Image: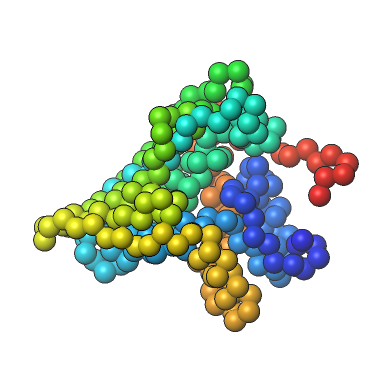
Amino acid sequence: MIAAGKPVLTEKPTASNAEEAREVRDAATAAGVTLLEGFHYLFHPVTRRLHELLATGELGELRQVQVDMVTAAPADGDPRWSLELAGGALMDLGCYSLHAHRMLAPWAGGPPRLVAARGGERAGHPGVDEWLEADLEFPSGATGRASCDMAGEGTRMTCRVVGDRGEATAANFVLPTGDDRITVSTRAGRRVEHLGTRPTYTYQLEALRAHLRHGAPLPIDADDALATMELIDACYRAAGFQPRPRLAVRPGMT
């Protein structure tokens, strides 16, 4: 698609590792085409509202972030458990946790750095993480915890931001079609806001269409995709895993 000069909407994360992501970024830049990584949550009013609560100062200075991504285990033969196909909890779920932290950079003095990470291997799948959590720190001194578990009980996809004047928690920031609540607690009291269950993917496609047709800016680009992949690789190494291997392209694959 890039070689043909076509804009690309990719799955998240864009590549198996940072080396691949850099190659994709460089190709998109050289071709002058748009590459949008499919972090659809970013376009929904739930996430936009979390950012607004920080931007308006209602929550005060950002102090702490906690993002949890938990799902029940896929079947043992599911591709998400395949190392060769870049599987693992961090790739499937934790990329959202890390990306959500990175998107808070405007209110934390810049993007976060990795402090430490730990994880557990999926039984029967050497090198594939079943769960992983990372400790992060922002230039402002705010701290973060990004966690993911692909063999948990039930489903939990929460994002909690804490400031020195209050805090807000999105009940399901990735799939607000199921739960669009944000609970805001400040000195003025506690309230629950509903931001709508219209699909995140619809907002994402509308933003991409506006960009391609009218030149409207997008919040992320190929550079952002590379930065996220570099953080993913760093988490894997810090937790005792290796980054996902390059995808072996076989004859007939496109």
**Whole-percent x, y for residue 38 in the image:** 57, 56
For this orientation, the residue located farthest to the right is 251
**Whole-percent x, y for residue 69 in the image:** 43, 40
Q: How is the image coloured?
A: rainbow
Residue drawn at x 68%, y 36% as measured from the top left: 85
Left-right relation of 21 to 167: right
The answer to whether residue 61 of the structure is visible from this angle is no
The answer to whether residue 201 of the structure is visible from this angle is yes
Number of marks present in the image shown: 0
For this orientation, the residue located farthest to the bottom is 214
For this orientation, the residue located farthest to the top is 124
Left-right relation of 159 to 28: left
Left-right relation of 176 to 194: right
Image quadrant in which the N terminus is located:
bottom right
Say which quarter of the image contains residue 241.
top right
Classify 214 as above or below 103: below
Residue drawn at x 53%, y 23% as measured from the top left: 121
* Pick the front one: 238 or 5: 5
Classify 18 as above or below 204: above
Residue drawn at x 88%, y 41% as measured from the top left: 251
Residue drawn at x 21%, y 64% as measured from the top left: 58
**Whole-percent x, y for residue 71 in the image:** 46, 35
* Pick the front one: 1 or 173: 173
**Whole-percent x, y for residue 167 in the image:** 23, 53
